[in-house]
Image (tube, rainbow, N blue to C red):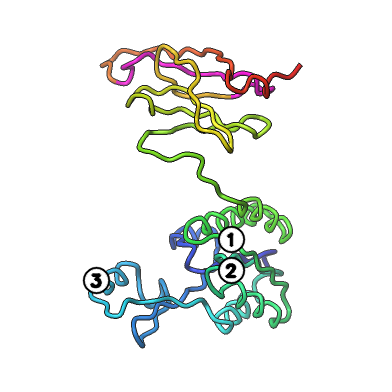
């Protein structure tokens, strides 16, 4: 008998092969076209849904898994596991979390813990996948919950645009983010810094294309891997990647530790 069984709902959008490989039980939400009700991913596939959506009048709507849906799943899983961890979409979006909680209180013979992912779709799926991987490595229920909760914190968009941003690296103290971007000129990748509140700030440009970066342990310097311009387009010619140090100028007062 396994220690922990992991359950999530189909809103998590976990590909079936991943759910199967990680032993994730997916409880389908309900998709309703008029008076017809379908279990998401069971009675109707995504391709079938979008095909019907083109001519649907009125448009379809969805409903959370019911108390009975969760009870049926828990009844089956209590024969296989000592405990059950359920990760639902945000309780602000529907009743899946509440239904799972009530079902968990009613089922006997197995411990059920329900975690509100505070998100939905693949963001919820990532939380479930992280927990499932921990369980596959032998995590008990408390450890699986702790791992999942690490991934359910607040999400913030720090910057948007048409530029190509790459290789984000948080400083050792978590107060600044260094990354590589071509926002000044397409294809010219240089180093930028930002924090939670400010606009991204460019460091002094280097002669070449920054391919990777890493913080020094004290957070006072950045180690940059720089390639010559056009290195990717030189037939048969290898271009050495040199490494240089560059001080995090904008945050000197914060990163210099004596």
Q: Which residue is mark 1?
A: 118
Of helix, strand and loop, which one carries label 2? loop
Q: Which of the two labelled residues, at mark 3 and mark 2, occupies the earlier sequence position? A: 3
Of helix, strand and loop, which one carries label 1? loop
Q: Which residue is mark 2?
A: 91
The quadrant of the image that shows the C terminus is: top right
Residue most toward the left? Answer: 55
The image position of residue 99, as x and y in percent, is 60, 78
- Tell me the crowding category of disc 2: few under 14, some 14 to 19, or many 20 or more residues within 10 angstroms, Cα based: some
Name the residue: 66% across, 79% down.
Answer: 102
Which of the 4 quarters of the picture holds residue 6?
bottom right
Q: Eyeballing the image, is 149 above or below 241? A: below
Which of the 4 quarters of the picture holds residue 141?
bottom right
The residue nearer to you, when weighing 110 against 122, is: 122
The image position of residue 82, as x and y in percent, is 71, 69
Give yes or no for residue 223 being in the magenta stretch. yes
Q: Eyeballing the image, is 119 above or below 64? A: above
Residue most toward the front? Answer: 198
The image position of residue 252, as x and y in percent, is 64, 19
The residue segment tinted magenta is 215-232
Q: Is residue 61 left or right of residue 234?
A: right
Q: Which residue is mark 3?
A: 54
Q: Which of the two labelled residues, at mark 2 and mark 1, occupies the earlier sequence position? A: 2
Give yes or no for residue 52 being in the magenta stretch. no
Name the residue: 27% across, 74% down.
Answer: 52
The image position of residue 156, as x and y in percent, is 54, 46
Name the residue: 32% across, 71% down.
Answer: 49
Name the residue: 33% across, 17% down.
Answer: 231
- Tell me the crowding category of disc 3: few under 14, some 14 to 19, or many 20 or more residues within 10 angstroms, Cα based: few
Pointers 2 and 1 in contact (C-beta within 8 Å): yes
């Amino acid at each position: 008998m396994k220690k922990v069984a992991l359950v999530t709902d189909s809103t998590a959008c976990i590909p079936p092969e991943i759910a199967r490989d990680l032993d994730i039980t997916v409880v389908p939400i309900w998709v309703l076209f008029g008076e017809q009700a379908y279990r998401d991913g069971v009675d109707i596939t995504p391709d079938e849904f979008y095909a019907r959506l083109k001519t649907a009048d009125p448009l379809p709507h969805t409903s959370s898994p019911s108390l009975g849906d969760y009870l049926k799943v828990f009844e089956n899983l209590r024969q296989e596991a000592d405990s059950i961890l359920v990760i639902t979409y945000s309780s602000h979006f529907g009743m899946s979390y509440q239904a799972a909680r009530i079902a968990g209180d009613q089922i006997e013979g197995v411990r059920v813990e329900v975690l509100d992912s505070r998100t939905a779709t693949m963001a919820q799926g990532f939380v479930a996948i992280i927990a499932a991987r921990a369980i596959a490595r032998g995590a008990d229920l408390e450890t699986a919950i702790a791992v999942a909760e690490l991934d359910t914190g607040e999400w913030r968009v720090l910057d948007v645009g048409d530029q190509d941003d790459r290789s984000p690296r948080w400083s050792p103290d978590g107060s600044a983010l260094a990354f590589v971007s071509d926002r000044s000129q397409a294809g010219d990748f240089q180093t930028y810094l930002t924090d939670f509140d400010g606009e991204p700030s460019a460091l002094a440009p280097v002669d070449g294309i920054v391919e990777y970066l890493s913080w020094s342990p004290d957070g006072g310097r950045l180690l940059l891997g720089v390639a010559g311009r056009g290195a990717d387009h030189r037939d048969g010619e290898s271009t050495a990647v040199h490494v240089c140090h560059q001080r995090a100028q904008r945050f000197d007062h914060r990163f210099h530790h004596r």
